[in-house]
C-alpha cells in the first residue's frame, strides 16, 4: 500500500471519524455531543470525496453530488439539534428554579412550625 | 472485586469505549484498504449520457437530472427543518428596520454584501457548465444575511407570508416543473432534452432563495431565539 493522496485522505477521514465518535460517546454535554456528530459527518464527507477519486484524471461525480447536498442537510440538522439542546437547558433551569422555590418554602414552613429543629 | 468495579464504573466505561472505537477504526482501515478499487460503470454512464441532460457540468447533471428524486426529497427535508425551527423564532420581539450606529460589522457588510450578491448570481448562472449552482449560491446569500443580522439590521421578518412563501418556493417550483413536464410527456421526473436546461435553471433559481432563507432562519433561531 503506497501512501498516495487518496490513501492519505481515506486514512485521515477514518481517524477523524474515530475522534468524532469518541467525542460523541465520552461527553455527556449536549453541545459537545452535537460537535462530535458534526465531526463524524465531516469525516464521512471526506471519505466519500476520497472514494470519488478513482484513478488519475477521473472523478466520480455521484459522491460529489451527495456530499454537496449532505453538507447543507448537516448544517440544518445541527441548527435543529442546537435549538433542541437550548430548549432542554431552558427547561432544566426552570425545573431547578422550581425545586429551589419548593425547598425554600418547605424550609420556611418547618422553621415557622418548629423553631428549635431545622431540616 | 465487585466494589472495585462499582467504584470505578466511569473509568471502566470510558476505557471500554476507547478500546472499542480503536478496534472499530482499525477494522475500518483494514477493510477499506483491502477493498478492490470500485468499477467506473456509473461514471462512464454519466459521461456518455451527458448531452441528454441539458447541462455540461456532471455534478449538476447528477443532482438535478439523473438523481432529481434525491434533490426533490432533500428540498422537502429543508422545508421540514424550517417548519421545525420556526417556533423558536416566533416568540422573539421583532425589531424595526433601524440602522444602528456605525459598527465595524456594518461597515464590512456595506462593502461585502453587494459583491457577494453578484458572486452568488454568477455562481448560480455558471452551475450548468462549471462547479457552482444553487447550493453554493445560497450559502453565499445566507452569509450575507448573517452578516446583516450581526450588524443588527433586521431585514427579514419570518412571520410574514411572503418570506414563508419564498422559503417554500424551492419545493413549489420543483413540484410545478415536475407537474408541467408530466402533463407534457406523461413520465415522472424525466426532463425532455430541449427543456432540461431551462427547467433546471428555474428550479435552481428558486432553490437558491429558499435554501438561503432556511439557512438564515436556522442561524437566527439559535442566535436570537434564545437570547
Image: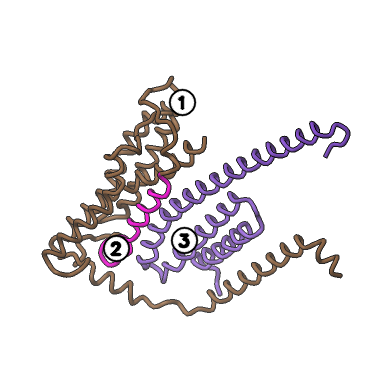
Above or below: residue B50 compared with residue A111: below
* Chain assigned purple: A
Give the class, few, some or many, for how many residues have Cα within 10 Å of label 1's Cα (few <14, many ≥20). Answer: few
Judge by depth and name the residue closer to the eye, A46 or B191.
B191
Q: Chain of mark 3?
A: A
How far is mark 1 from mark 2, CA to CA?
A: 41 Å
Label 1, on which residue? Answer: B104
Question: For the point 34% across and 48% down, which residue is it?
Answer: B211
Q: Chain of mark 1?
A: B
Which of pointers 1 and 2 indicates the residue nearer the eye? Answer: 1
Question: For the point 62% across and 71% down, which residue is it?
Answer: B24
The N terminus of chain B, quarter of image: bottom right
Above or below: residue B54 compared with residue B24: above
Quadrant of the rendered structure where residue A48 is?
bottom left
Judge by depth and name the residue closer to the eye, B213 or A90.
A90
Q: Chain of mark 2?
A: B
How far is mark 3 from mark 1, CA to CA?
A: 35 Å
- What span is colored magenta in the figure? B63-86
Judge by depth and name the residue closer to the eye, B29 or B150.
B150
Q: Which mark is residue B58?
A: 2
Outermost left residue: B184
Q: Position of residue B14 (x, y in %)?
A: 71, 62
Membership of B153 in magenta stretch = no
Q: Position of residue A28 (x, y in %)?
A: 65, 54
Label 3, on which residue? Answer: A45
Q: Colour of chain B?
A: brown
B63 left or right of B29 in image: left
Above or below: residue B153 compared with residue B130: above
Could you tell me which secondary element the residue under label 1 belongs to? Answer: helix
Amino acid at each position: 500500500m503506497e501512501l498516495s493522496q487518496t490513501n492519505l485522505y481515506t486514512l485521515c477521514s477514518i481517524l477523524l471519524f474515530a475522534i468524532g465518535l469518541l467525542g460523541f460517546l465520552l461527553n455527556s454535554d449536549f453541545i459537545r455531543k452535537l460537535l462530535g456528530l458534526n465531526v463524524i459527518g465531516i469525516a464521512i464527507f471526506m471519505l466519500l470525496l476520497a472514494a470519488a477519486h478513482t484513478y488519475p484524471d477521473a472523478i466520480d461525480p455521484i459522491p460529489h453530488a451527495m456530499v454537496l447536498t449532505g453538507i447543507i442537510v448537516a448544517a440544518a440538522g445541527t441548527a435543529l439539534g442546537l435549538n433542541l439542546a437550548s430548549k432542554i437547558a431552558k427547561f432544566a433551569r426552570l425545573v431547578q428554579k422550581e425545586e429551589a422555590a419548593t425547598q425554600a418554602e418547605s424550609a420556611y414552613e418547618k422553621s415557622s412550625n418548629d423553631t428549635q429543629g431545622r431540616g | 472485586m465487585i466494589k472495585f468495579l462499582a467504584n470505578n464504573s466511569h473509568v471502566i466505561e470510558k476505557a471500554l469505549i476507547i478500546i472499542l472505537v480503536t478496534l472499530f477504526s482499525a477494522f475500518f482501515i483494514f477493510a477499506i484498504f483491502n477493498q478492490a478499487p470500485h468499477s467506473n460503470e456509473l461514471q462512464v454512464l454519466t459521461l456518455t449520457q451527458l448531452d441528454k441532460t441539458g447541462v455540461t457540468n456532471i455534478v449538476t447533471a447528477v443532482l438535478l437530472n439523473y438523481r432529481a428524486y434525491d434533490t426533490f426529497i432533500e428540498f422537502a427535508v429543508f422545508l421540514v427543518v424550517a417548519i421545525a425551527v420556526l417556533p423558536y423564532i416566533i416568540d422573539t420581539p421583532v425589531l424595526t428596520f433601524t440602522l444602528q450606529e456605525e459598527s465595524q460589522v456594518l461597515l464590512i457588510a456595506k462593502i461585502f454584501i453587494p459583491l457577494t450578491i453578484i458572486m452568488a448570481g454568477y455562481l448560480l448562472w455558471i452551475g450548468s457548465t462549471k462547479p457552482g449552482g444553487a447550493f453554493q449560491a445560497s450559502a453565499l446569500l445566507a452569509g450575507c444575511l448573517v452578516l446583516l443580522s450581526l450588524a443588527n439590521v433586521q431585514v427579514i421578518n419570518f412571520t410574514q407570508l411572503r418570506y414563508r412563501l419564498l422559503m417554500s418556493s424551492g419545493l413549489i417550483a420543483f413540484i410545478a416543473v415536475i407537474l408541467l413536464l408530466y402533463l407534457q410527456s406523461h413520465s415522472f421526473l424525466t426532463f425532455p432534452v430541449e427543456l432540461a436546461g431551462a427547467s433546471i435553471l428555474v428550479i435552481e433559481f428558486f432553490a437558491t432563495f429558499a435554501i438561503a432563507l432556511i439557512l438564515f432562519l436556522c442561524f437566527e433561531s439559535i442566535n436570537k431565539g434564545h437570547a
